[in-house]
């Protein structure tokens, strides 16, 4: 029954996403001091900020307001690929974006704006699909396309292919990767599970990018 299959798939995705948000939230708490000012870009339902709201001074941003949580927090509808962030230069402690950069049509503008508003000791903490793991490499050899990539322009889907080493080099004029980790693996199919036995880096990536002047 298609309806039952849809419900099962949705429940599976929701559980994976819940786990990812929890892992990412703990990553932030372990790497950002209490009471710091944090912008969450791409807040979606607000679940991550709900987890962080007692520890930090939060400001939420997204393309539209889909919040189910944190409706009392400061929020602005904004396109982070072309709109100026509503903050002064060198004024923000930390910027958080989980599963966002793979959707952006202009990541150069995005990162330039992050660099502008961050304090000299500021941090960017992001997570994104790990296109460098062995499973993705196998799928690229087979199909010429990584899994979870290939949406159309203006679709809101995954349109950026950014291997981790590429990000390291591309961001190096203004940022430096401080540390990285992996969150809960986004797929539950049998092949990724088997591959993960041999390659623990199969998981999606989240990492800290300090403002380079902080290093």
Image (tube, rainbow, N blue to C red):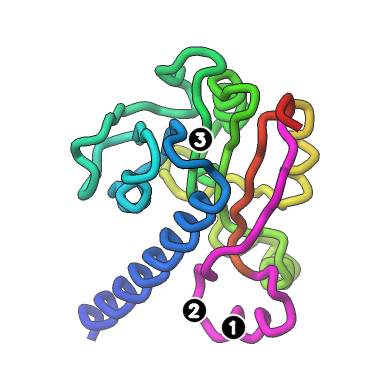
Look at the picture and state if 131 lies above or below 172.
Answer: below
Look at the picture and state if 4 lies above or below 171.
Answer: below
Q: What residue does disc 2 label?
A: 188
Question: Is 183 one of the magenta-colored residues?
Answer: yes
Q: Nearer the viewer, residue 118 or 54?
A: 54
CB under 8 Å between discs 2 and 1: yes
Residue under the point 37% across and 65% down = 18
- How far across and down, in percent of the image, does residue 122 sit? 59, 30
**Earlier-in-chain disc, 2 versus 1:** 2
Q: Is residue 3 left or right of residue 56?
A: left
Q: What residue does disc 3 label?
A: 95
- Residue stretch rendered in magenta on the structure: 175-202
Residue under the point 60% across and 45% down = 160
Q: CA distance from mark 3 to mark 1?
A: 32 Å
Badge 3 element: strand
Residue under the point 50% across and 25% down = 92
**Is any atom of residue 40 visible in this view?**
yes
Classed neighbour count for the residue bearing mark 3: other residues with Cα under 10 Å, few (<14), some (14–19), many (≥20): many
Foreground mark, 3 or 1, reads: 3
Residue under the point 56% across and 17% down = 90
Q: What residue does disc 1 label?
A: 193
- Dividing the picture into quarters, in which one does residue 142 lie? bottom right
Q: Is residue 176 left or right of residue 7?
A: right
Quadrant for the C terminus, please.
top right
Badge 1 element: helix
- Dividing the picture into quarters, in which one does residue 14 lie? bottom left
Identity of the residue furthest to the front in this view: 34
Badge 2 element: loop
């Amino acid at each position: 029954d298609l309806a039952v299959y849809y419900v099962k798939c949705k429940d599976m995705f929701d559980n994976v996403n819940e786990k990812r948000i929890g892992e990412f939230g703990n990553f932030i708490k372990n790497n950002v001091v209490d009471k710091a000012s944090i912008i969450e870009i791409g807040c979606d339902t607000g679940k991550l900020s709900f987890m962080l709201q007692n520890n930090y001074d939060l400001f939420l941003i997204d393309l539209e307001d889909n919040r189910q949580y944190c409706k009392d927090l400061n929020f602005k509808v904004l396109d982070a690929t072309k709109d100026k962030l509503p903050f002064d230069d060198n004024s923000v402690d930390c910027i958080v974006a989980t599963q966002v950069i793979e959707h952006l049509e202009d990541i150069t503008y995005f990162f330039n704006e992050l660099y502008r508003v961050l304090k000299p000791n500021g941090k960017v903490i992001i997570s994104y699909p790990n296109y460098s793991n062995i499973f993705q490499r196998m799928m690229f050899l087979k199909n010429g396309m990584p899994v979870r990539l290939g949406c159309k322009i203006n679709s809101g889907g995954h349109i950026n292919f950014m291997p981790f080493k590429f990000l390291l080099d591309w961001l190096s004029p203004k940022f430096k990767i401080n540390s990285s980790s992996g969150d809960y693996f986004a797929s539950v199919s049998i092949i990724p599970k088997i591959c993960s036995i041999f390659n623990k880096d199969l998981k999606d990536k989240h990492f800290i990018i300090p403002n380079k002047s902080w290093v």
